[in-house]
Image: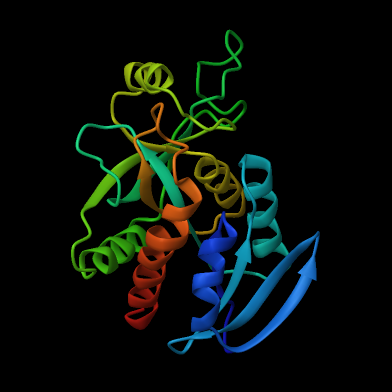
Amino acid sequence: MPHSPAAIVSAMHEELRALLPLLDDRHTVRLAGRDFHHGVIHGQPVVLALSGIGKVAAATTAVLLMHAFDSRQLVFTGVAGGLAAGVNVGDVVVARQLLQHDMDASPLFPRFEVPLTGRARFDADTDLADALAAATRSCSGVRLHQGLIVSGDRFIASAADSDVLRALLPDALAVEMEGAAVAQACADFGRPFAVVRTISDRADDAAHLDFVRFIDEVASATTRAIIEEWLAHV
């Protein structure tokens, strides 16, 4: 390949399965129990990977992509629960910042701050986030939001839990389980990253209903359209 690939990471099998048909000249490398699919999409070298669910799985995958495959930039795709008013099922959120809502090393460090880093919020790469936002806008019928996404190793599936997050982090648009860990790993490597999420639920008591079907039938198609549009205009 002419230069280091862009990495596109999916949390769920359904999304990866939707992206794989876009990949030309595909070959697969297995490492640390994961399959990394190399190829070309719209003339751009890429590597697709399934991270699995949760912060450790996501961080492990991100580190492998940057260290073993020298990925020049990383885009994480998936679904999220909507937190802010007006962030509804089927909408897309492009992260501008990410934070671990379950990080709490107080009183040694302020709540949410990642110990020894001096910060709680990690900024997504501006140019990459701009490009994904533009690609989202080109998708007919998709409503775009941009701002803070929060991550934690817990599936938020009650109105009470969502209310707690909204009170603690009133500017949070959505909640998921991987993005902030990817942000921290990419910051360590100095690599640009972005996170794009389709809203699958409102992170309330109905969050689990038809979750996998939504990913398979709606979110995966939205992700594919955004990623294809982005790579076509890199």
| Number of residue marks | 0
Residue at the image position 55 percent from the left and 59 percent from the top: 10
Is residue 150 rendered to the left or right of residue 90? Answer: right
Residue 39: tell me if it is visible. yes
Q: Which image quadrant is residue 36 in?
A: bottom right
Closer to us: 224 or 188: 224
Residue at the image position 54 percent from the left and 40 percent from the top: 177
The quarter in which the C terminus is drawn is: bottom left
Which residue, as the protein is rendered here, is positioned at the far top?
107
For the rendered model, the colour scheme is rainbow
| Rendering coords of residue 94 (x, y %) | 33, 52
Residue at the image position 71 percent from the left and 62 percent from the top: 67
Question: Vertical placement of 142 versus 97: above or below?
Answer: below
Is residue 146 rendered to the left or right of residue 150? Answer: left
Residue at the image position 81 percent from the left and 59 percent from the top: 32
Question: Vertical placement of 106 versus 56: above or below?
Answer: above
Q: Which image quadrant is residue 84 in?
A: top left
| Rendering coords of residue 23 (x, y %) | 54, 83
The quarter in which the N terminus is drawn is: bottom right
Residue 194: tell me if it is visible. no
| Rendering coords of residue 70 (x, y %) | 65, 69
Question: Vertical placement of 135 versus 124: above or below?
Answer: below
